[in-house]
């Protein structure tokens, strides 16, 4: 089975993430998609993250009963900060029957040569790259392992959502209802 790995903090997950996941499943050869919740992205400040288990729960609420989507806590068990190469190595050992591909924005492809062991990742995994409004794709766009996907551009950011909640704005339509209700109930992002 070919599984797309959509890595992210998902702090919080929103409709942009879900539209993109749906598009990848319907318009590419990916059969399943896992939302890999990163406990600590080496490029992000850890203090801005709510608890990893809470973010995983938000992903679970967001995807509901769609059996093609799965929340994944695989990186919770690995050393932090999380590096993609380590996660992929672990997944290949644990699930040798599956083929794993990475899903990333064009902005990440541009910085991909700075990732730990990026050549090794490209040797064994395809990259499904979706467009981002304000970024060029970079030198890897013609690499045989890179698939450019003409997904809709969703300019919604978790950062903007967190800031809006802090400012007491109603963000209910930026995420599934269950996610919004849980965020309100738990008072996430209010301070």
Image (cartoon, rainbow, N blue to C red):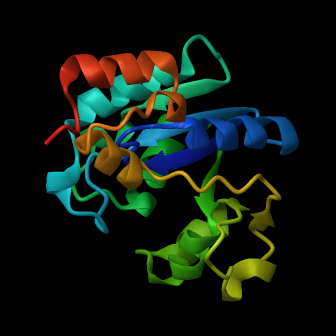
> Residue at position x 69%, y 82% from top?
140
Q: Nearer the viewer, residue 39 or 92?
A: 39
> Residue at position x 83%, y 58% from top?
150
Residue that protrudes farthest toward the top in the picture: 65
> Residue at position x 42%, y 46% from top?
90
Q: Is residue 177 above or below residue 94?
A: above
Image coordinates of residue 154 in percent, x first then y, are: 64, 52
Image coordinates of residue 31 in percent, x first then y, are: 76, 33
The reply to whether residue 81 is visible in this rendering is yes
The reply to whether residue 98 is visible in this rendering is no
> Residue at position x 39%, y 57% from top?
86
Residue that protrudes farthest toward the bottom in the picture: 139
Total number of numbered discs in the rendering? 0
Q: Along the horizontal axis of the image, is 31 left or right of 157?
A: right
Q: Nearer the viewer, residue 82 or 52?
A: 52
- Quick one: quadrant of the N terminus? top right
Q: Nearer the viewer, residue 77 or 20?
A: 20
Image coordinates of residue 16 in percent, x first then y, are: 59, 43
- Quick one: quadrant of the C terminus? top left
Image coordinates of residue 105 in percent, x first then y, are: 61, 63
């Amino acid at each position: 089975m070919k599984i797309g790995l959509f890595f992210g903090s998902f702090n919080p997950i929103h409709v942009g993430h879900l539209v993109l996941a749906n598009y990848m499943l319907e318009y590419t050869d990916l059969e399943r998609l896992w939302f890999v919740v990163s406990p600590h992205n080496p490029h992000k400040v850890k203090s801005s993250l709510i608890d990893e288990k809470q973010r995983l729960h938000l992903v679970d609420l967001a995807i509901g009963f769609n059996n093609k989507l799965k929340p994944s806590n695989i990186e919770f068990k690995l050393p932090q900060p999380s590096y993609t190469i380590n996660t992929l190595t672990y997944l290949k050992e644990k699930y040798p029957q599956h083929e794993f591909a990475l899903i990333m924005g064009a902005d990440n492809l541009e910085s991909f040569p700075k990732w730990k062991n990026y050549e090794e990742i490209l040797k064994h995994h395809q990259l499904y790259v979706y467009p981002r409004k304000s970024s060029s794709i970079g030198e890897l766009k013609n690499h045989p392992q890179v698939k450019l996907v003409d997904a809709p551009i969703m300019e919604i950011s978790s950062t903007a959502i967190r800031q809006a909640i802090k400012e007491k704005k109603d963000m209910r339509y930026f995420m599934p209802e269950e996610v919004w209700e849980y965020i309100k109930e738990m008072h996430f992002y209010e301070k």
